[in-house]
Structure formats: C-alpha cells, structure tokens
C-alpha cells in the first residue's frame, strides 16, 4: 500500500485511464475465479496512481501464491501480514510492473474493511477522532478497550478519564462491525458515503460531520498519525482544510494525551453491550477466587522448589479433568488437603 512495497521490481505510477484498465482487468480475474473482492473507493479527482488495493476474502483452501502465479504471473511477491504486494503487466502500452496489493480480509470484517480503506485515509481520520473519546476503529469494527479496574464504574455510568487512561489490563469490547451502525452512532450519513463523493472537499466535510469531530483532535497525535500527516498527501490536505498546521502538532503518547473525554458509557448504552462487561466481571471474579484457593505457595509449604515445584504443580493440575471447574466447586480447605496428600505421595514415590 503506497506503491513502494516491491524491492526487486521497479514499479511506475499510472494515469487514471490506465489505472481504470488495470482495475477492470483484476476485477474480471477475481470474478471469474469466484473470489469475493472489492476495491476501496478512490479519492475523487486523483490523476495518477502508484498501486491498486484489492480487498478479498480467501475461499476455503485458498493457496494465495499458486493463485497469483496462475492468474498474474508476478515477478515479485512481498507479503507483510495480511497484505501481499506484487507486480502485474498488461501489455507494454497499458501497464508494466504496476503494483497490486492484495489484502486478505475475514468475511465478517469485509464491509468494515472496505469502509476503512476507502478514500485514502478515511479510516485513519475517523480512527483518530474516535480515539479522542476513548473508542477505537479498525477493520475489525468500532470497539473500546476497557480497563479492568474501571469495568464496574463503566456499568454504573461513573467511569472517568482516570479509568480510561489505564493502559494495562484491558478487555476489548467490539461495539459493531457494521459500517451503517457505526455511522449512525457517529452521526454520519452512510447514504452519502454509499452514493460516493465528487471531490476531496466532500470527503473532508463528511469527516467533519462526525459528532465527535473537533480540529483540536488533530493538534496532538501519536507517532503513526504524525507520520501520516507528513507523508500522506490526503491526510495533509485534510489538516490544511481544517486549518491545523502540521508543524505545530505535538506528540501524544498512546492513550495519554490522545483522549479528550470518555464516551465509553455512551457507546456501551447505544450498542447495548452491558452483558459483555458483566461477563468479563464474572470471569475476573472467578479468576480471583481461584487464585485465592490455589497457588504455588501450597507446594512450597510442602518443601518443593525450583524445577520440582513447577513439575508438581503441572502434574497436580493434569490430574483434574477440568481444573477450573475443580477450583470452582471445591472448598479451599479441601484443595489444601488434596495438595498436601498429593505432595506426600510424590515424596514417598521418589524414595
């Protein structure tokens, strides 16, 4: 993505006309192969392109490299995570060594990924905006990372900035993976997005229509967004549109300095995810109760230490068909007695 992934093959930018031919060529191949795919919406008015992004859902048993070799015969393939970049050639007059980026996407994330990658940095801009109110946005959807110590406060509607700025021990709550639901929550007209934008200014105005938008959100950015602001023309143009000087942007650490207010309780209420939090709380309480009943200290009291300690604990756990259930259903005194009996038998067997 960006047109510079390949190292052995020198790729070239193409005009909008040639890009349209390449786009149609790739889509026709994917359709004939029965592979679900889509190309994110491009920024209106763009006159040249450095690469083509293609979102696709790998079918069962899909062998990516074999598929690429058979249908595109690339000279070079570079894979980074879910993105595979390769060169395509469609005759010397249309495209020679043009970069195509295949982005593997789970079926349940396909629509959100399409929204996120469309119009260059649309997903990145909205991601920064929702981060400012304690939420997150990515191809998995709209979510929030909830601090373990703040879960009850979140349920009670009393969560503060103190809880949300805790970076350790969090649980993820997916709010929605549906772009329409996300847009409704953010106050965006998804129909406008669906119909398409006629200019970059329309895209910028769409971003500004978000209920949480404020130019101040973009005056303090983490490393990733500061990099986008300097290296990506669309992101930079948006900053210019909202009159934020990239040179005046301050560095923000992850979460601290990025978050301006806590909207997690509002989001939790809107998407009705209280039961997810309650389940997390129940799981944490169960873990705490188990830790109170069983620990290495029981074996250390019996004289085990070092490697022998770890082996004894491992074997005791393995002796239970369902160790967590055993802890949940057995009284602490009984567990202590079982460990004592186990340790004594182990020592006798070692004589």
Image (tube, grey):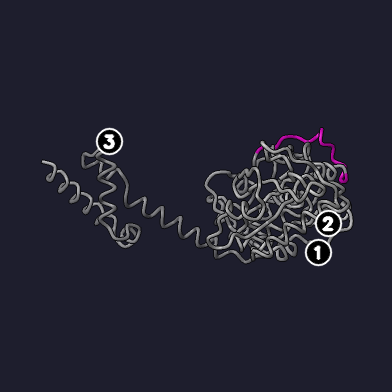
Distance CA(mark 1)–CA(mark 3): 62 Å
Q: Quadrant of the N terminus?
A: top right
Q: Earlier in the sequence, mark 2 or mark 3?
A: 2
Viewer-proximal residue, 311 or 5? 5
Q: Is residue 146 left or right of residue 257?
A: left
Horizontal and vertical percent position of residue 9:
69, 38
Q: Earlier in the sequence, mark 2 or mark 1?
A: 1
Q: Secondary structure at mark 1?
A: loop
Query: Could you tell me which residue is drawn at 55 percent across and 65 percent down?
Result: 275
Viewer-proximal residue, 266 or 202? 202
**Circles 2, 1 touching at the beta carbon (< 8 Å):** yes
Q: Quadrant of residue 286?
A: bottom left
Q: Which residues are magenta?
A: 241-253
Q: Is residue 300 left or right of residue 277?
A: left
- Residue 306, labelled with which disc? 3
For disc 2, the neighbor class at 10 Å (few under 14, some 14 to 19, many from 20) is some
Query: Could you tell me which residue is drawn at 87 percent across and 48 percent down?
Result: 47
For disc 3, the neighbor class at 10 Å (few under 14, some 14 to 19, many from 20) is few
Q: Is residue 244 magenta?
A: yes
Outermost residue, front side: 92
Q: Is residue 281 left or right of residue 324?
A: right
Viewer-proximal residue, 317 or 169? 317
Q: Is residue 348 above or below residue 319?
A: above
**Circles 2, 3 touching at the beta carbon (< 8 Å):** no
- Residue 189, labelled with which disc? 1
Q: Is residue 268 left or right of residue 340?
A: right
Q: Secondary structure at mark 3?
A: helix
Q: Secondary structure at mark 2?
A: helix
> Is residue 135 among what the camera can see?
no
- Which residue has dot 2 on it? 206
């Amino acid at each position: 993505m960006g047109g510079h992934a390949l190292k052995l093959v020198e790729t070239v930018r193409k005009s909008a006309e040639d890009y349209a031919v390449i786009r149609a060529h790739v889509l026709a191949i994917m359709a004939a192969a029965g592979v679900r795919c889509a190309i994110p919406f491009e920024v209106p008015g763009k006159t040249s392109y450095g690469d083509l992004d293609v979102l696709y859902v790998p079918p069962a048993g899909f062998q990516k490299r074999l598929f690429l070799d058979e249908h595109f015969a690339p000279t070079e393939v570079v894979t980074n995570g879910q993105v595979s970049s390769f060169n395509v050639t469609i005759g010397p007059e249309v495209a020679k060594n043009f970069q195509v980026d295949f982005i593997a996407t789970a079926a349940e994330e396909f629509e959100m990924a399409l929204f996120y990658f469309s119009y260059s940095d649309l997903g990145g801009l909205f991601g920064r905006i929702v981060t400012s109110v304690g939420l997150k946005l990515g191809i998995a959807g709209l979510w929030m990372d909830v601090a373990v110590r703040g879960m009850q406060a979140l349920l009670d509607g009393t969560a503060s900035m103190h809880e949300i700025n805790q970076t350790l021990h969090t649980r993820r709550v997916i709010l929605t993976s549906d772009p329409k639901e996300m847009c409704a929550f953010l106050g965006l007209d998804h129909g406008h997005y669906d119909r398409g934008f006629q200019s970059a200014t329309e895209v910028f105005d769409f971003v500004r229509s978000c209920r949480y938008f404020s130019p101040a959100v973009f005056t303090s950015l983490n490393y990733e967004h500061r990099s986008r602001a300097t290296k990506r023309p669309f992101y930079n143009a948006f900053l210019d549109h909202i009159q934020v000087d990239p040179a005046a942007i301050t560095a923000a650490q992850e979460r601290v300095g990025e978050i301006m207010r806590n909207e997690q309780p509002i989001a939790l209420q809107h998407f009705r995810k209280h039961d997810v939090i309650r389940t997390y709380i129940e799981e944490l309480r169960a873990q705490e109760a188990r830790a109170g009943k069983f620990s290495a200290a029981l074996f250390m009291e019996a004289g085990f230490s070092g490697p022998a300690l770890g082996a004894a604990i491992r074997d005791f756990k393995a002796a239970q068909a369902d160790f967590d259930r055993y802890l949940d259903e057995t009284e602490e005194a009984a567990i202590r007695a079982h460990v004592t009996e186990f340790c004594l038998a182990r020592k006798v067997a070692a004589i």
